[in-house]
Image (spheres, helix red, strand yellow):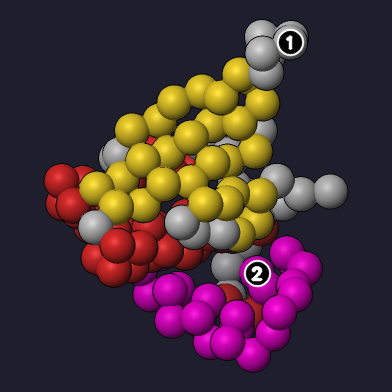
Amino acid sequence: MGRYYQGDIEGKFWFGVQDSTDANHFGGDEYEIVDEETDDVYELGYSFSMDDIETINEGIATCIKDLGEYKEKFDEFFDNTTSYNPDELARHIGVTKEKYRDLIESYARLQLGNQIKVCVWERGECNFTAEL
C-alpha cells in the first residue's frame, strides 16, 4: 500500500523514500485535514499560488544542486524503466548505498516540485491533499 497525493496534481509518494510532507520544500501553505469523528489528522492539504513561484524555483534548484552530476544518470535510468531496486540503481549511477539514499530523496522531491511548478504556471494555483 502506498501513500498518494491528489487534487490539481496526482501521484504516489516514493515508498521508503519520500515523506508525506515533502511539498513543504517548495513553500506554499500546508493545513491539516482532520477526521471529524476521531479528531485524527489523516491528510495534509497544500495550496500554492503564483506568489510561491520563487520559493518553488528555489526548492527545485536545491534538488538539482544536491543531485549534481547524478541528475542526468537518474534521468537516463528512469527514462528506460518504470521500476527499480536500490542496489541496481546505486550501481547504475555509480555511488555507494549511503550516497544513493540522499540522491534518490532529492530526485523524488524534484519530481514533485516540477509537478507543482507546472500546475501553478498552467492554472495560477495548485491545490492537493497528501495521505499520511
Point out which mark residue 90 bears. 2
Question: At 18% across and 52% down in the image, what residue appears?
Answer: 50
Query: At numbered mark 2, what does the secondary structure look like: helix, strand or loop?
Result: helix
Left or right of 64 in this view: 77: right
Tell me which corner region of the image, top left, top right, bottom left or bottom right, holds residue 80: bottom right
Left or right of 58 in this view: 1: right
Question: At 42% across and 39% down in the image, what residue appears?
Answer: 46
Where's residue 40, x and y in %?
68, 14
Question: At 43% across and 81% down in the image, what residue appears?
Answer: 72
Q: Are marks 2 and 1 in contact (CB under 8 Å)?
A: no
How many numbered callouts?
2
Residue at the extreme right: 1
Q: Which residue is mark 1?
A: 37
Where's residue 47, x and y in %?
36, 41
Magenta residues (range): 62-90
Does the segment drawn in magenta span residue 85? yes
Residue at the extreme bottom: 80
Is 79 rendered above or below residue 44?
below
Which secondary structure type mostly characterizes the magenta part of the structure?
helix
Using the numbered discs, state the Cα–Cα distance from disc 2 to disc 1 in whole angstroms.
Answer: 45 Å
Dot 1 surroundings within 10 Å: few (below 14), some, or many (20 or more)? few
Q: Which one is closest to the eye, mark 2 or mark 1?
A: 1
Question: At 57% across and 51% down in the image, what residue appears?
Answer: 6
